[in-house]
Amino acid sequence: MGIRGALAVLLCVVACSQAGRAVKADKSDKAFEKQVLAGIYELTQKDETVIRNLVEKYKCQSAYLDVGTNIGVQIRKLFEPQKYKSSKVRAIFDKYYGKSRCNVCAFGFEPNPRHSKRLDGLQSKLRDAGAAVHIFQAAASDNDGLARFIYPSYDKYGWQGANIIGSRHGHRPTTRAVIVNVRTLDLARIVRVIREAMDNNGGERGNILAKIDIEGAEYAVLPHLLHQDVLCKEIDGAYIEWHAGHFAHVDNVTRKVTPKIPMDNHFKELKAFFAGGSGYLNKGGVRKTRMITLDDNTHMLDKNMTWPSPGEICNRGSP
């Protein structure tokens, strides 16, 4: 089955479920289930091949995870810091990667179809300039599969309140929402493959830094990363934007926000848990992810920023 065929099968599952298709435990349904699983498996294998090839080709020792890439400005800040001198994240990148970024692989995660053309261009331009970049045009999640992605139709930039959790928090009350099916990636699986690929390159263990800005999905993804030993074991640092407002009731007339109880309490506890501690290697050799307080929204539209010329970021010579 080809990649397009695998996606077609997964989309069929969503379409059938939305049409109210009954699920029966007969032979035909079991065969269909196997076909769906085979499609997911083929896509995950392609993901992992892409990661291993990129890490090997560029000899990456460290990695940056741009989880919620939007139009890719944070990745440009990583590889072109001289163009973004007012950026708040520059000092963090310097701390985790040093001044040279030629041994850093950057992986972006963005499901918004409005950004596809821009992200294709960004990946191509940065690779031509010598940077190791791959954008997964899919949503980071706690599973591999499909989700319904929602965003407001009036937002010309395509990012305000866009999410996979079904929330319309931040949308105008009279606005029509656009809903599309998008692929989801198990972020824990991706991180483990990245770490394994970097370890296979040999040399000193490098850092993995993550930016997580996924409009409410962090409340599913972060516990999953913790349960999978990815946060404490593989990710060295993370800066996270929290979106508890997606889970509150918003009055359509007064726009008053009322937190939902008891869920809101759980979110506060979760946030406090991850915010606690400064990062260390304990006596048992278990790493603890350093949680960084940072929200860098500078240069959101990337206005007037020219693309780098071939070889400008890392001159790797002839292939």
Image (cartoon, helix red, strand yellow):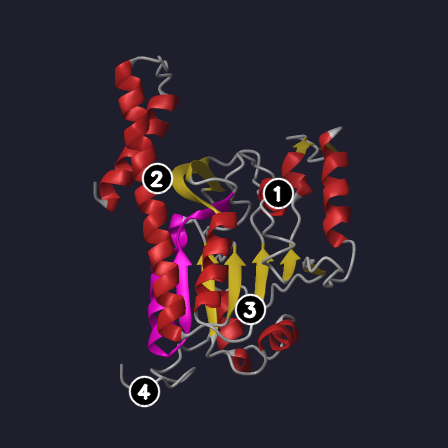
Q: Earlier in the sequence, mark 3 or mark 1?
A: 1
Q: Earlier in the sequence, mark 4 or mark 3?
A: 3
Q: Earlier in the sequence, mark 1 or mark 2?
A: 2
What's the distance in space between the residues labelled 1 and 4, CA to CA?
Answer: 42 Å
Instruction: Estimate the x, y position of residue 201 in percent, counting from the top left.
Output: 44, 71
What's the distance in space between the residues labelled 4 and 3, CA to CA?
Answer: 31 Å
Q: Residue furthest left?
A: 1
Q: Residue furthest front?
A: 284
What's the distance in space between the residues labelled 2 and 3, CA to CA?
Answer: 36 Å
Q: Earlier in the sequence, mark 2 or mark 4?
A: 2
What's the distance in space between the residues labelled 1 and 2, CA to CA?
Answer: 22 Å
Q: Nearer the viewer, mark 1 or mark 4?
A: 1
What's the distance in space between the residues labelled 3 and 1, CA to CA?
Answer: 35 Å
Q: Residue at x 78, y 54 (%)?
A: 276
Are the residues at dot 3 and dot 1 in contact (C-beta closer than 8 Å)? no
Label 1 Cα neighbours within 10 Å, binned few <14 / some 14-19 / many ≥20: few
Q: Earlier in the sequence, mark 1 or mark 4?
A: 1
Circle 4: residue type:
Gly
**Mark 1 sits on what residue?**
227
**Mark 3 sits on what residue?**
299
Instruction: Estimate the x, y position of residue 229 in percent, counting from the top left.
Output: 61, 49
Circle 3: residue type:
His
Q: Earlier in the sequence, mark 2 or mark 3?
A: 2
Circle 2: residue type:
Ile
Compared with 162, 306 (above or below) is below
| Residue range highlighted in magenta | 113-141
Question: Along the horizontal axis of the image, is 233 left or right of 23?
Answer: right
Instruction: Estimate the x, y position of residue 73 in percent, counting from the top left.
Output: 50, 66
Circle 1: residue type:
His
